[in-house]
Amino acid sequence: METSVSFSRDMDDEYEKLIRRMNPPRVVIDNESCKNATVIQVDSANKQGILLEVVQILTDLNLVITKAYICSDGGWFMDVFNVTDNDGNKITDEGILDYIEKSLGPDSCFASSMRRSVGVKLGTDHTSIELIGSDRPGLLSEVSAVLTNLKCNVVNAEVWTHNTRAAAVMQVTDEETGGAIIDPERLSLVKRLLCNVLKGSNKTREAKTVVSLGATHTERRLHQMMFDDRDYERMGEDSSDEKDRPNVNVVNWHGRDYSVVTIRCKDRPKLLFDIVCTLTDMQYVVFHGNVEAEGAEAHQEYCIRHIDGSPVKSDAERQRVVHCLEAAIQRRVSEGLKLELCTSDRIGLLSDVTRIFRENSLTVTRAEVTTRSGKAVNTFYVRESSGYPVDPKIIDSIRQTIGQTILRVKGSPDESTQAPQESPTRFLFGGLFKSRSFCNFGLVRSYS
């Protein structure tokens, strides 16, 4: 049976290569026709997952997609994106433009691997750990402490929380070798201890830990993990503020056998990726789409069918699509005060910082941990554990402990005017904590 599946995959790959040679992808990058954005047009033979791959490449470059036109009806795929950098400027960096053209053009390799591995990047210089469990105050601190005690260094990590659930993808290295952890017994111990932390006292929801040497696309995996964990299911009385909830609507366009999804919500970076990722994981195909950001609001519209060719068949399925898209939009919404830490990386840094947060009654709602050339650049979104606004005096105290120039409050009015202060040497080297390591294309609007 396994041999038959492998043979089928090989045949699919050869067929895709043939189609690609006959119809190579074409990328046109235009910096002249639009006044305030770079226009990127991608034409290619159509196949399942291609839209997500294109959006993912643009998103990974931190490009802001202000408008998009999507058309993949039939055997051909055509997308047009208006993109800017984070400051609202056109993309003029030749290195970025060349990367886009090579990644999406005829020399790219994404077409042949699309069906099996959207978002998968191989790598063996670190060990990947995926965690899913019930959220609670101090969870990241406890996870980080376990990894430190096991002599694992967290080099990259992303943590999301949504609807009482927490998910994380962490990349760790061995403290002694600086490479991936490969000892099976040690990996088993890491998995077991982390799973115990995730379970906590909650016996009603499953906790899960996966350890591997392969690297996945972090944000895509986080969406998949939380979707599989059914974080979109509303728990009892929904206490979220109605005005903050995305406006998602799904109706059937019977004349064309499409289901039309319309979304209005606050605009933010990576919104398009989050929505396309979820539709793809739910086995829906986008045939047409129109995306536009107007000021602070985003308006997106998609004509979709299930991968089996059918539109949404029932009210229950419609409600599930609505709830899943709401969850996809809200997972990345950053609740709380934004703190940014930048200092020399060292073993146990994440554990020390998050322990200080926990001891000051702060809980982390989202985190991005990166290591660049020996420097730790970490972003945390924190709120008071009891739900009240964060007391500025607590933040001042934490910054005094960690170092005013090491930990900054992002977005505060006085951020750029704060005088540099000496950083606590003991914090930098970990000695302080050694004893306590723990364009609108006119869609018909007359739907029924």
Image: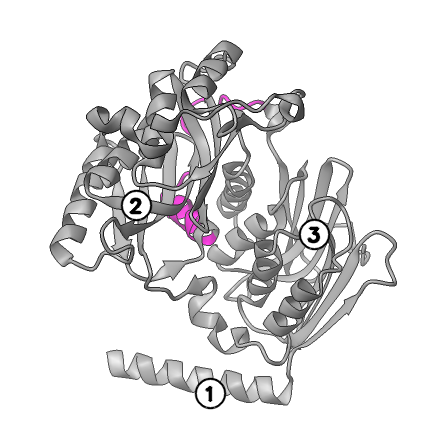
> What's the magenta region?
220-241
Judge the density around disc 1: few (<14), some (14-19), many (≥20) Cα neighbours within 10 Å: few
Judge the density around disc 2: few (<14), some (14-19), many (≥20) Cα neighbours within 10 Å: many
- Write down the quadrant of residue 34 in the picture: bottom right
Task: Assess whether residue 428 is covered by the magenta stretch.
Answer: no
- Name the front one of labels 3 and 1: 3
Q: Give the image location of residue 441, x and y in percent.
A: 80, 58
Numbered label attached to residue 65: 3
- Write down the quadrant of residue 111 in the picture: bottom right
The vertical placement of 118 against 425, above or below, is below
Question: Image check: 209 left or right of 167?
Answer: left
Report how far apart the C-alphas of labels 3 and 1 lie in the structure.
Answer: 33 Å
Front-most of residues 161 and 159: 159
Q: Give the image location of residue 17, x and y in percent.
A: 52, 85
Q: Are marks 3 and 1 in contact (CB under 8 Å)?
A: no
**Residue where numbered disc 1 is placed:** 14
Q: Is residue 76 visible?
A: no
- Name the front one of labels 3 and 2: 2
Question: Image check: 136 left or right of 88?
Answer: left
Front-most of residues 179 and 231: 179
Q: What residue type is disc 3 on?
A: Ile
Q: Give the image location of residue 400, x and y in percent.
A: 45, 18
The vertical placement of 436 against 170, above or below, is above
What is the quadrant of the N terminus in the image? bottom left
**Residue where numbered disc 2 is placed:** 153
Judge the density around disc 3: few (<14), some (14-19), many (≥20) Cα neighbours within 10 Å: many
